[in-house]
Amino acid sequence: MDLATFETRTGLWPHMQFTDVEYDVCSAGIEIYAIDVSRQTKSKLFICRVTSEQQAAALTAQFKEWLPKLKLKKRKVALNLARMACDKSYPANPKFQDRSDMRRNTTRL
């Protein structure tokens, strides 16, 4: 699995803050999960299934390295969206004056 696929998989749940990766041994093989413990409950997102514990350990280590990068990228995107929202709420030119309301309030003689 590459970084883009991992980002897509974890990005489908933007409200979750994945902080760890772990694997569990089950009857079908070894399953790797991204973990969210930011709330009162522990949420697990299934990432993939592998056949050997060595492969699971290697992938888990790789995914743990990617989590901070994805978190930083998510913060930058949120910051840029916030900046764009602020920029849209104020005029681009600080000397700009909206005079549309002045036209409505003037009376003609």
Image (cartoon, rainbow, N blue to C red):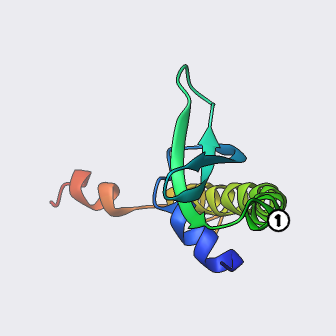
Residue reaching furthest left?
A: 109
Tell how many labels.
1
The answer to which of 28 and 70 lies nearer the viewer is: 28
Residue reaching furthest front?
A: 27
Amino acid carrying mark 1 in the image: Ala
Give the quarter of the image for residue 50. Answer: bottom right
Give the quarter of the image for residue 87. Answer: bottom right
The answer to which of 89 and 85 lies nearer the viewer is: 85
Q: Quadrant of the C terminus?
A: bottom left
Reading the image, the residue beneath label 1 is 58
Q: Quadrant of the N terminus?
A: bottom right
Q: Position of residue 88 (x, y in %)?
A: 52, 63
Q: Please tell me whether residue 92 is drawn above or below residue 81 in the rendered image.
A: below
Q: Position of residue 28 (x, y in %)?
A: 49, 58
In the picture, measured across the screen, residue 34 lies left or right of residue 68, that is left
Residue appearing at x 75%, y 59% in the figure? 53
Q: Please tell me whether residue 42 is drawn above or below residue 83 in the rendered image.
A: above
Q: Position of residue 22 (x, y in %)?
A: 70, 46
Residue appearing at x 62%, y 50% in the figure? 34
Residue reaching furthest top?
A: 40
Q: Is residue 96 visible?
A: no
Classify mark 1: residues with Cα within 10 Å, few (<14), some (14-19) or many (20+): few
Q: Position of residue 86 (x, y in %)?
A: 58, 55
Q: Is residue 50 visible?
A: yes
Residue appearing at x 72%, y 54% in the figure? 71
Q: Secondary structure at mark 1?
A: helix
Give the quarter of the image for residue 3. Answer: bottom right
The answer to which of 38 and 62 lies nearer the viewer is: 62
Residue appearing at x 40%, y 62% in the figure? 99
